Image: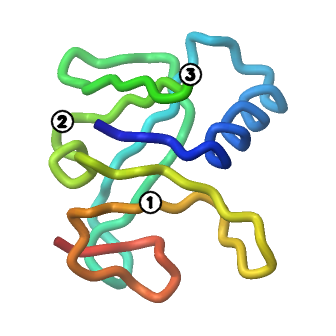
Amino acid sequence: MITVSDKAKEKVLKLKQDAQLDDTFRLRASVAGGGCSGLSYNLDFDDEVKPMDQEFEDKGIKVVVDMKSFLYLAGTELDFSDGLNGKGFYFNNPNASRTCGCGDSFSV
């Protein structure tokens, strides 16, 4: 399962509202090769659910993940930081054995 913190929920809802997206749009989380640690996270809105996608809902936020990415993201919490050293959305991923300094990439 992919979970969503309260702060991430607020930010996702605000972004959807600002972009005038309806409830058919879900948050798509994925992993791609790249970044200084080998794998990088991607977030976007998507109104299509593909046959092999895993779909989750936490705190009213629907999240879809392709099966390959889910292997890396299982048990992950999506969070958001807006403090002085805030960096936006970030993933609390229990599967990551190493992350880069910026937090945008990881390895397992």
The kind of residue on which mark 1 rests is: Phe
Where is residue 87 drawn, in percent x and y?
Answer: 66, 71
Identity of the residue drawn at 29% across and 18% down: 50
In the image, taking residue 71 as reference, residue 64 lies left or right, namely: right
Where is residue 66 drawn, in percent x and y?
Answer: 26, 35
Where is residue 13 drawn, in percent x and y?
Answer: 71, 31
In the image, taking residue 69 as reference, residue 82 lies left or right, namely: right
Outermost residue, bottom direction? 101
Depth check: 66 or 71 in front? 71
Q: Nearer the viewer, mark 1 or mark 3?
A: 3
- The residue carrying pointer 1 sits among few (fewer than 14), some (14 to 19) or many (20 or more) residues within 10 Å by Cα, namely some
Label 3 with label 2: CB-CB less than 8 Å? no
Identity of the residue drawn at 50% across and 47% down: 43
Identity of the residue drawn at 45% across and 35% down: 28
Pointer 2: what residue? 67
Q: Secondary structure at mark 2?
A: helix
Residue 38 quadrant? bottom left
- Which badge, 3 or 2, comes first in the chain's sequence? 3
Pointer 1: what residue? 91
The kind of residue on which mark 3 rests is: Gly
Where is residue 48 drawn, in percent x and y?
Answer: 43, 17
Q: Secondary structure at mark 3?
A: loop
Q: What's the CA distance linking mark 1 and mark 3? A: 18 Å
- The residue carrying pointer 2 sits among few (fewer than 14), some (14 to 19) or many (20 or more) residues within 10 Å by Cα, namely some
Q: What's the CA distance linking mark 3 and mark 2? A: 22 Å
Pointer 3: what residue? 60
The kind of residue on which mark 2 rests is: Met
